């Protein structure tokens, strides 16, 4: 099964009912913009195809052909929303579903189903906004899945508290080609280092390294 294994990110906007139709449409456009930039990234582009699909008003789904980079993509999407909507505090829950993803399937297959079911099982309030669900066929990674879940909770705790500047600094480290913001003035090294420290990057970096080294 590993040959046809992929990841799907299914997400929805946290407490989207707070916002009017125009704001929700702006959020949808920003998610599409963020994921399109990711698809064009030299380091990630080959892993993201096809484009994001949006549904149920505030829901979205993005296939990632390489599960190994799925956590990095989650961080970049949430970072993008933090930069664009810092004052509004807009964020998204995300469940990473990993399972069979046939080459010919478009928004269908085991990974899509697992991801959607995983998101539905996540608490809308009071729980972590980042989760991983694995196909039962991937028994070799059951230990990894158990180990990584509390780490994802730690990552989510830090991401929830990012400021726009902190999110921006993390995005540049995660992928310099898409970490550029609209700000004309780039922060100096000292400012960037401070922002990364405040964002909890040393913790996130270690968890991300473990995820990308040990996972499929």
Image (tube, rainbow, N blue to C red):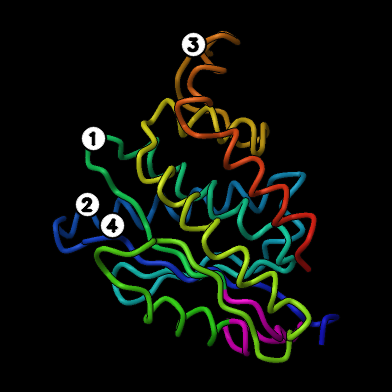
Foreground pick, 110 / 151:
151
Q: Secondary structure at mark 1?
A: loop
Q: Which residue is mark 3?
A: 185
Q: Secondary structure at mark 2?
A: helix
Look at discs 1 and 2 and give the one toward the viewer.
1
Residue at 23% x, 35% y is 87
Q: Position of residue 33 (x, y in %)?
A: 48, 49
Residue at 64% x, 77% y is 98
What segment carries the magenta color? 97-111
Q: Which residue is mark 1?
A: 87
**Disc 4 + disc 3, Cβ < 8 Å:** no
Q: Quadrant of residue 111?
A: bottom right
Q: CA distance from mark 3 to mark 2?
A: 28 Å
Look at discs 3 and 1 and give the one toward the viewer.
1
Q: CA distance from mark 4 to mark 3?
A: 29 Å
Q: Which residue is mark 2?
A: 23
């Amino acid at each position: 099964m590993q040959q046809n294994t992929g990841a799907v990110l299914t997400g929805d906007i946290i407490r989207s009912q707070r916002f009017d139709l125009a704001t929700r449409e702006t959020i949808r456009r920003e998610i599409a913009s963020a994921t399109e930039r990711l698809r064009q990234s030299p380091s990630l582009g080959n892993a993201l195809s096809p484009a994001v699909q949006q549904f149920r008003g505030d829901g979205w789904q993005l296939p990632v052909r390489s599960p190994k980079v799925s956590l990095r993509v989650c961080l970049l999407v949430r970072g993008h929303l933090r930069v664009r909507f810092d004052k509004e505090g807009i964020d998204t829950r995300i469940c990473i579903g990993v399972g069979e993803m046939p080459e010919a399937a478009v928004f269908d297959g085991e990974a899509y189903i697992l991801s959607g079911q995983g998101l539905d099982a996540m608490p809308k309030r009071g729980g972590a906004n980042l989760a991983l669900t694995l196909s039962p066929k991937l028994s070799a990674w059951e230990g990894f899945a158990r180990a990584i879940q509390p780490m994802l909770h730690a990552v989510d705790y830090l991401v929830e508290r990012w400021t726009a500047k902190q999110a921006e600094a993390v995005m540049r480290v995660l992928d310099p080609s898409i970490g550029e913001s609209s700000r004309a003035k780039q922060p100096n090294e000292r400012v960037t280092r401070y922002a990364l420290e405040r964002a909890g990057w040393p913790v996130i970096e270690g968890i991300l390294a473990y995820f990308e080294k040990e996972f499929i």
